[in-house]
Amino acid sequence: MADDYLVRIGKLIRDARQHRGWTQTQLAEALGTSQSAVNRIERGNQNISLEMIARIGEALDSEIVSLGYSGPMHLRVVGGRRLSGSIDVKTSKNACVALLCGSLLNKGRTVLRRVARIEEVYRLLEVLNSIGVRTRWINEGIDLEIVPPAQLDLDAMDAAAARRTRSIIMFLGPLLHRMDRFRLPYAGGCDLGTRTIEPHMIALRRFGLDITATEGIYHAEVSRTAPDRPIVLTERGDTVTENALLAAARNDGVTVIRNASSNYMVQDLCFFLEALGVKVEGIGTTTLTVHGMADIDVDVDYSPSEDPVEAMSLLAAAVVTESELTIRRVPVEFLEIELAVLEEMGLDHDRTAEYAADNGRTRLIDLTVRPSKLEAPIDKIHPMPFPGLNIDNVPFFAAIAAVAQGQTLIHDWVYDNRAIYLTDLNRLGGRLQLLDPHRVLVEGPTRWRAAEMMCPPALRPAVVVLLAMMAAEGTSVLRNVYVINRGYEDLAERLNSVGAQIEIFRDI
């Protein structure tokens, strides 16, 4: 391997380690090697095998190399260009992964329409395929067909794929009805600080699920019982609510879930359960009453709705680049607070009359955004459970606030690390002051400047950095964008279709 390749690989490993917040010693311990060996690798002074690169990538949850390709994917962005035309919002990432987990409830054939072809979905498909579920893309690769086996082979589970997604946690609800005991690898996903699964356990214990955790594995034992009183969730979380719903769907009786999330992916899962024959009362509220079925064996065809967070991403792209852009198929009921805040900041926009999504339930609009003179909001930007400002939309307000006149306080109270990643915008000319791990003060307007940098290890901050690069005059490079591919389908190509200039390239 040529010396310059070794240096390039070493730099990528060093950047990935630093973004993970690890020391060389911590990485060495994860790899079972010495700190001095890691130091030599990062300086390009040691030959390194593909196997070792893959192990490092797994330890850091970063795609250092990708088998079958020439290396990790990067983006070269020529900024300062105006966007124009129209762009459609894709189906919801978070709904699609919940529905993939929900397909385990059904003994029959499940078809999901217009499934997002993203890395998070691919990881779950790898897990499903490994345990015997047959999946295939149909209708020219647009829709996904899922056919379960008579018996799941959990011992054959692809543990590496499972560890790369937190969505694997939503296997617990369906599996507790199929197996008396089983194992699941620890969940992974974005690096957003410590997130306990105890709220899941509090809900699922009521169905007889008992979990012990040893050596990176959840060991589950099931003594199947039915809840004898309403389940009160200790956290109004999306995946917690979904897990409780998935468990309740196969409980032959009535389950009441209180303090439930009513967010978009939860509603889509409820609509899917209804298509399976499960009656769900209270959809869109914080109290769900589920009339479960002991056995579900139907052929079902379901269309998940569009992704409000992707819609917010595209809206932010138009604002930051001072463009006129029409965003079609926007799920407005999950963006009403965001739009109300942006109206107060001075956003110039039009919206069409509402129409129904393909699921027949979610309300959509087409939204046209025009260049606007924005003022910083008087109140802080902070997330709340639906119908409040969406937790995943908070990072986009960092980029929007950076182009507004004045100071904006952003309080991202949910995640431990995400506010810290937003300060990466400072490398592109932003003026963000980190007040504490959860609060950032943003000063605008910003004169963006091009830069070369490593992609933050969290999905939404990574996209925010990309949007700022699109606004910055000159050429920027965003390295190792696997985390963006986890949540967005062909984002660079789609932005190019409305006037961006983003080139995908690989080092080696």
Image (spheres, rainbow, N blue to C red):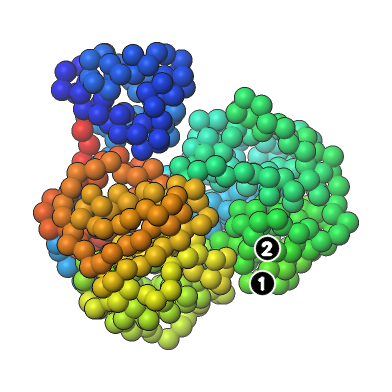
Residue projecting furthest to the front: 435
Q: Quadrant of residue 507?
A: top left
Tag 1's secondary structure? loop
Look at the image and tell me whether residue 104 can be seen.
Answer: yes
User: In the image, is 388 to the left or to the right of 310?
Assistant: right
Pinpoint residue 152: horizontal percent, then vertical percent.
67, 36
Residue projecting furthest to the left: 474
Q: Nearer the viewer, residue 456 or 132?
A: 456
Tag 2's secondary structure? loop
Question: Residue, x 61% and y 57% (percent of image)?
Answer: 237
Pinpoint residue 18: horizontal percent, then vertical percent.
34, 34
Q: Residues within 10 Å of mark 2 (few under 14, many from 20)?
A: many
User: Up-down: is 361 above or below 134?
Assistant: below
User: Up-down: is 253 above or below 481?
Assistant: below
User: Up-down: is 292 above or below 372?
Assistant: above
Q: Nearer the viewer, residue 396 or 379?
A: 379
Query: Which residue does the numbered mark 2 point to in the structure image?
Result: 260
Q: Are marks 2 and 1 in contact (CB under 8 Å)?
A: yes
Question: Residue, x 28% and y 71% (percent of image)?
Answer: 406
Amino acid type of the residue that numbered disc 1 sits on in the rendered structure: Thr
Q: Quadrant of residue 114?
A: bottom left
Look at the image and tell me whether residue 487 can be seen.
Answer: no
